[in-house]
Image (spheres, rainbow, N blue to C red):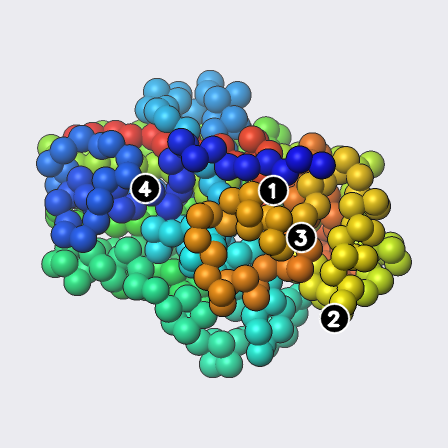
Amino acid sequence: MDLPQPDAHTPHLADVVPSVLAAMGVAGFQTRIDLAAEVGGACVLLIDGLGAELLDVHADDAPVMAGLRGRTLQAGFPSTTVAGLAAVGTGCRSGEHGLVGLSFRLPGVGLINPLRWRPHPWGDDLREAAPPEEVQPMATTFERAASAGIAVSVVSPAEFSGSGLTRAVLRGGRYVGVQALGDLAAAVRGAVAGGGFCYGYHGEVDLLGHLYGPGSPAWRMQLREVDRLVESLVEVLPPGGLLAIVADHGMVAVDDDEAVDIDTCAALLDGVQAVGGEPRARYVYVDDGAADAVLAAWREVLGERAWVASRDEAIAAGWFGERVGDEVRARIGDVVAAARGSATMVRRTGEPLESSLVGHHGSLTTAEQSIPLLLAYG
């Protein structure tokens, strides 16, 4: 089976923040995506789960964002929130920042869920046992900008203040915890008007896509609310202000008939120590000497439902970017499986909540990988 390879000519989500900061004239950042020169205050607003295909299909529900539609970016692998936020916060792809999925094996710790910074699928907080600043030690884009004298703020739900993921990839800015669309809009407006840089986050499009499916009535109503948020921000952009809207991934509605339950399939568990990732992007960690047999078994069972590769094959195909650090290699599964079409690789016993969701993401399909870049200038 031929493995998909990222398009080297399509900009990546990791390119957005460095390009915005370069347009603001911040020392140490280079332009990766062409933007207007002489930008004053700026905000990168991330709408979780807003894939480019979804926005294009539902443009009537989001006329303001559809009118700002520019080029398409790629989310990178895995196309999931942990890796996406890390790309924003570090300016690097997953092979460098090392937060390689919804769950992955951290040597010396075990399987970790970095969204909750706890063992996967459950367990106690790991912020002391696995300090986020050590798991992801690179200086963030926000730390670098603040060191250059820019006022940096992170505008995100109050519940995430001080979380492990926030400390790992969003540290360096003043955290502004918000509760709803109103204070999110007010905080972004204030940061841009003051000539600073802010990163803003809204997660409910993704949430409703998981629960009801992308394109469902509930999802479309939430998209309309987000479009009004964007309209309110565009209306108050000061001269020289920039609002850059992106997403961390798209989403697909999955088919129960195409689901494979790993927990009940002996062939998928033989020789396997642990299974990480998520239903559309799996990492398989194997017993010593079992890698070839496990790879063959997963390929046979999944067939056309997934691209199945060894760790080395996935890295060589560029799934994790051009550079993959040695410490990151150890976090990637010995076998990597990326779902095709509407298939999933669920774990109904070990991951009952995730396995019950209607919408999913994580893989390499265009619906999951293509994300929009929307630009508005004051």
For label 2, the residue is 288
Question: Spatial distance from mark 3 to mark 1, Cα to Cα?
Answer: 16 Å
Please rate how many residues cluster around mark 3, counting C-alpha atoms within 10 Å: few if below 14, some from 14 to 19, many from 20: many
In front: mark 3 or mark 1? 3
The residue at 50%/49% (across/down) is 320
**Which residue corresponds to mark 3?**
310
Mark 1 to mark 2: distance in Å? 27 Å
Label 2: which secondary element? loop
Give percent across and percent down for residue 19. Answer: 25, 41
Q: What amino acid type is highlighted by mark number 4? A: Val
Name the residue tied to disc 4.
16
The three-letter amino acid code for the residue at tag 2 is Asp
SS category of the residue bearing label 1: loop
- Residue at 47% x, 41% y is 75
The residue tagged 1 is 363
Instruction: Return the mark for residue 208.
Output: none
Label 2 and label 4: CA atoms lie apart by 40 Å
Q: Give the CA distance from mark 2 to mark 3.
A: 14 Å
Q: Is residue 251 left or right of residue 296?
A: left
C-alpha span from label 4 to label 1: 21 Å
Circle 2 crowding by C-alpha within 10 Å: few under 14, some 14–19, many from 20: few
User: In terms of depth relative to the viewer, which is nearer, 259 or 270?
Assistant: 270
Residue 359 spot, x, y in % from top left: 64, 40
Type of the residue with mark 1: Ser
Quadrant for the C terminus in the image: top left
Instruction: Identify the element where label 3 is drawn.
Output: strand
197 or 315, nearer to the observer: 315
Question: Which circle's residue, 2 or 3, is located before the other in the chain?
Answer: 2
